[in-house]
Amino acid sequence: MGEKIGAETAVSRLTGWVMAEHQDAIEKTFEFKDFSEAWAFMNRVALKAEQMNHHPEWFNVYNKVKVLLTTHDANGVTTLDTEMAQFMDAIA
């Protein structure tokens, strides 16, 4: 499940991520050149999410993908979330 670290600690370790307003979660909006690039990003993340068995909440409109990460089983942000965030940052 990952070690629970909380949103504040997570955002201090990441670039461009912020704490969500109403829950122990982190979020970031990624912007791409067009819809195809946004979709390709989501496909790569989906494969990683399946491998990790840790799935993001996200919303896509055209070239933007808004992501929210939290570990529901832990009721908050864990090291799994920071691992996923770092992966997303690396491929974006």
Image: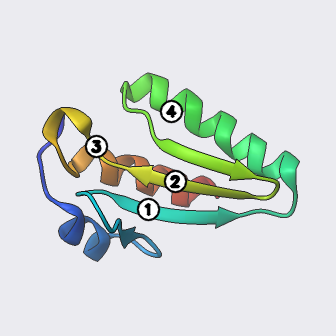
Q: Which label sits on residue 50?
A: none
Please say if the residues under marks 1 and 3 sit with CB atoms less than 8 Å apart.
Answer: no
Separation of marks 1 and 3 at Cα, in angstroms? 14 Å
The answer to which image quadrant residue 86 occupies is bottom left
Query: What is the C-alpha distance between the residues marked 1 and 2?
Result: 5 Å
Q: Circle 2 is placed at which residue position?
A: 67
Q: Which numbered disc covers residue 80?
A: 3
Q: Position of residue 52 (x, y in %)?
A: 38, 28
Say if mark 1 contacts mark 2, CB within 8 Å: yes
Q: Nearer the viewer, mark 4 or mark 2?
A: 2
Residue type of the residue flagged with mark 1 = Glu
Q: Amino acid at mark 4?
A: Lys
- Foreground of the two, 25 or 87: 25
Marks 4 and 2, the one that precedes in the sequence:
4
Alpha-carbon neighbours of circle 3 within 10 Å: few (<14), some, or many (≥20)? many
Residue shown at 57% from the left, 28% from the top: 47
Q: Residue 29: image x %, image y %?
A: 58, 65
* Front position among marks 3 and 2: 2
Q: Quadrant of the C terminus?
A: bottom right
Left/right of residue 91 with respect to residue 75 in the rendered view? right
Q: CA distance from mark 1 to mark 4?
A: 18 Å
Is disc 1 in contact with disc 4, using a CB cutoff of under 8 Å? no
Identify which amino acid the numbered label 2 is placed on: Val
Q: Disc 1 or 2, which lies upstream in sequence? A: 1
Compared to residue 82, the image places residue 52 above or below, namely: above
Point out the tag, 1 or 3, that comes first from the N-terminus: 1
Mark 2 neighbour class, 10 Å CA radius: few under 14, some 14 to 19, many 20 or more: some
The residue that disc 4 covers is 48
For the residue labelled by badge 1, is the local secondary structure a helix, a strand or a loop?
strand
Q: Earlier in the sequence, mark 3 or mark 4?
A: 4
